[in-house]
Image (cartoon, rainbow, N blue to C red):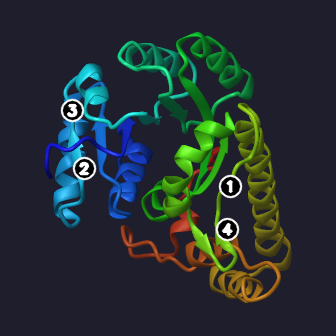
């Protein structure tokens, strides 16, 4: 890739960060990536090469990271919610200018996003809190994006997020949600609905297994049939697949029968 400045930067290269950076690069946007530990930067740069020499470059420090992004800079951060977000904003904003944009793509409390926007306002830096849904696969191939922040900032981000979001029959799974904090609020409601769905699926599984007496294969076929109608959804689809998955470690029974009872949260 040439030394031209990048269209967008992404800082924070855990699973979601790596995959969203590669998503943007695969859609034709040049991306600069940064991370607290250099090993993740090297890994992401190598992945970009392996996946078709995508337009992605690395950086070794916050200052170099910012210097490689075209003005007005568009910076997406994907780090753990809470204090790490504040620390990352402090490190990056030191090298940024009025008119630049910081987008926090983590699962953050909306009041924290409002506070950060107010703290960055004297510097003239726009702040956007953007909910991201779809997990690792969605981040790489097209997530649902829920941006909330200044309209001026959204207008500059729109070409990127519209192209990188999941695409359905009536368009991209994104759009301007509203002022700062609104994107986080919509993601919170989204998560609540999703968790309720998972609770319902779990209870239906228990009824079919313990009361109706269905086998795993029978339950899998039932969920697959439901997925052909009004219950068509990703969660119903994968439930059918999970129930039918044989255990390839013991060679006996199904994976679901070997799973310990734990609380699992997917976002």
Relative depth, front residue between 27 and 20: 27
- Evaluate if marks 4 and 3 touch, with contact meaning CB atoms under 8 Å apart: no
- Local crowd size for mark 4, using a 10 Å CA cut-off: few (<14), some (14–19), many (≥20): some
| Element class at badge 3 | loop
Which residue position holds label 3?
Answer: 59
Of the two numbered discs 1 and 4 in the rendering, the one whose residue sits closer to the viewer = 1
Q: Is residue 180 left or right of residue 104?
A: right
- Local crowd size for mark 2, using a 10 Å CA cut-off: few (<14), some (14–19), many (≥20): many
Q: Position of residue 218 (x, y in %)?
A: 69, 87
Residue at 35%, 39% in the rendered image: 13
Work out how far the residue at label 3 is from the one at label 2, CA to CA, in angstroms: 10 Å
Badge 2 or badge 1: first in the primary sequence: 2
Quadrant of residue 112 within the rendered picture: top right
Work out how far the residue at label 1 is from the one at label 4, CA to CA, in angstroms: 24 Å
Which residue position holds label 1?
Answer: 175
Of the two numbered discs 1 and 3 in the rendering, the one whose residue sits closer to the viewer = 1
Of the two numbered discs 4 and 3 in the rendering, the one whose residue sits closer to the viewer = 3
Asked if residue 135 can be seen in this view, the reply is no
Work out how far the residue at label 4 is from the one at label 3, CA to CA, in angstroms: 38 Å
Q: Answer above or below: position of 229 versus 7.
A: below
Which residue position holds label 2?
Answer: 56
Quadrant of residue 22 within the rendered picture: bottom left
Work out how far the residue at label 2 is from the one at label 1, CA to CA, in angstroms: 25 Å
Badge 4 or badge 3: first in the primary sequence: 3
Q: Position of residue 196 (x, y in %)?
A: 81, 54
Task: Determine which of the numbered discs, if any, sits on residue 235 in the image.
Answer: 4
Badge 1 or badge 3: first in the primary sequence: 3
Residue at 41%, 43% in the rendered image: 17
Q: Position of residue 265 (x, y in %)?
A: 63, 46
| Element class at badge 2 | strand
| Element class at badge 1 | loop
Asked if residue 83 can be seen in this view, the reply is yes
């Amino acid at each position: 890739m040439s030394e031209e400045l990048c269209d967008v930067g992404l800082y924070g290269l855990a699973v979601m960060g790596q995959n969203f950076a590669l998503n943007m690069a695969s859609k034709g946007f040049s991306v600069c990536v940064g991370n607290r530990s250099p090993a993740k930067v090297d890994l992401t740069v190598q992945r970009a090469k392996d996946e078709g020499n995508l337009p992605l470059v690395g950086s070794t420090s916050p200052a170099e990271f910012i210097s490689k992004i075209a003005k007005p800079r568009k910076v997406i951060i994907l780090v753990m919610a809470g204090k790490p977000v504040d620390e990352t904003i402090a490190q990056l904003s030191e090298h940024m200018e009025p008119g630049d944009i910081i987008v926090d793509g983590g699962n953050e409390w909306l009041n924290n996003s409002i506070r950060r926007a107010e703290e960055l306002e004297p510097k003239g830096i726009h702040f956007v809190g953007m909910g991201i849904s779809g997990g690792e696969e969605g981040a790489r191939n097209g997530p649902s994006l829920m941006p909330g922040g200044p309209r001026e900032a959204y207008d500059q981000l729109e070409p990127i997020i519209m192209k990188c979001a999941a695409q359905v029959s009536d368009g991209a799974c994104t759009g301007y949600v509203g002022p700062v904090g609104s994107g986080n609020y919509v993601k919170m409601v989204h998560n609540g609905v999703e968790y309720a769905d998972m609770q319902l699926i779990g209870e239906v599984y228990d009824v079919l297994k313990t009361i109706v007496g269905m086998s795993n294969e029978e339950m899998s076929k039932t969920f697959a049939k439901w997925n052909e109608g009004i219950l068509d959804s990703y969660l119903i689809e994968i439930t059918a697949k999970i129930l039918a998955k044989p255990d390839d470690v013991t060679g006996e029974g199904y994976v679901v029968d070997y799973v310990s009872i734990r609380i699992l949260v997917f976002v």
